[in-house]
Image: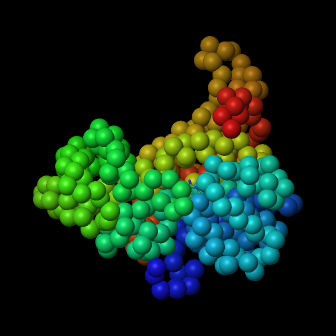
Amino acid sequence: MTAEKPTHTRHVPVMLPRILDLLAPALEAADRPVHLDGTLGMGGHAEAVLERFEHVRVVGIDRDPQAIALASERLARFGDRFVAHHGTYDEVPEALALHGVDAAESMLFDLGVSSLQLDEVDRGFSYARNAPLDMRMNPTVGASAADVLNTYEHGELARVLKEYGEERFAGRVASAVLREREVEPFTDSARLVELLERTVPAASQRTGGHPAKRTFQALRIEVNSELSIWATTVHRALDHLAVGGRLAVLSYHSLEDRLTKQALAAGATSSAPPDLPVELPEHAPWLRLVTRGAEQPDEAERAANRRSSSARLRVAERTRTADRPSRRENR
Ligand SMILES: C[S@@+](CC[C@H](N)C(=O)[O-])C[C@H]1O[C@@H](n2cnc3c(N)ncnc32)[C@H](O)[C@@H]1O
């Protein structure tokens, strides 16, 4: 564990003033609005919402028990205006029920990993220091990064490395892992880092950054099923957004951003068949895109907080109710 630093210094919230401004119209227009923070983390964004909008109640979800404990302590001064839900962020309805509602006026999902998780050596997210190859955001459930390395077949491992890590040498790295695990199963990060340094060609190491960066990212995404959970959650979140409510999503990976973009675009586009002379009300768009494309942090923020440099922010507003039976069946 890292030394006990104050919670607010352990993770700098990304694009904070911009997000508050973009959510403000939805929160200011309602009497007793609820804001759902689907990725509570250290509670930085949630605290700013509670401070700026004094009539807002907040529910925060996180799958990481340590994040829930630290953020709950930080936000205790807001009394029953804040409640926490320990679970994955697809549990939107269960979390909203803690405030007795079925829809939120605003929502924020700040996807990916927190600085706390990266800094806690024991949790194995970072390739910079030797640690057990774990990487589970909720360390009490599921398979660890070591399990993935020790059990996946070649094709499956190569796919994970290529898709989630954009590792050009995914096949070569997967072959090296399979050879190495015959000698002894993987348990900690130093051995994997050393294998990657040997396997990724030197020329690529000069241009592509640290040879372990992409593989560690890929393993983290796989271990935590980040993309598959997000693919379900983005639709569920929209289903539980009040009319006039706004959803904000910060993504750090192109695949997450693509899923977000597609889900928002689908709601913001008429579903009328092209040969229909007039658009029926049920075919009209039910979302309005608030950001034009994805917004990025400005240069000053990127320089001050390196973790923000890949962030992409998309915000949409719900303009009407929409009956989408196929989505509702998925619950
Ligand atoms: C980037 S941090 C959020 C930081 C937060 N906005 C703040 O200001 O402190 C992302 C958080 O989301 C959590 N998380 C990631 N995937 C999740 C999931 N599927 N369900 C619930 N929480 C998740 C992580 O455990 C982490 O604490």
**Quarter of the image where one finds residue 163:** top left
Residue found at the far left of this picture: 202
Residue found at the far right of this picture: 31
Residue depicted at 15% across the width and 59% down the height? 198
Is any part of residue 11 visible from this angle? yes
Residue depicted at 63% across the width and 41% down the height? 235
Closer to us: 246 or 182: 182
Residue 168: x %, y % from top left = 24, 47
When the figure is inspected, residue 41 is found, relative to residue 257, above or below; the finding is: below
When the figure is inspected, residue 189 is found, relative to residue 93, above or below; the finding is: below
**Quarter of the image where one finds residue 319:** top right
Closer to us: 48 or 201: 201
Left or right, 118 with respect to 87, comes to left
Q: How many marks?
A: 0
Left or right, 88 with respect to 162, comes to right
Tell me, what colour scheme is on the image?
rainbow
Residue 161: x %, y % from top left = 32, 48
Is any part of residue 23 visible from this angle? no
Q: Quadrant of ligand 1?
A: bottom right
Closer to us: 13 or 141: 141
Residue depicted at 47% across the width and 69% down the height? 117
When the figure is inspected, residue 195 is found, relative to residue 236, above or below; the finding is: below
Residue depicted at 78% across the width and 65% down the height? 57
Residue 13: x %, y % from top left = 55, 70
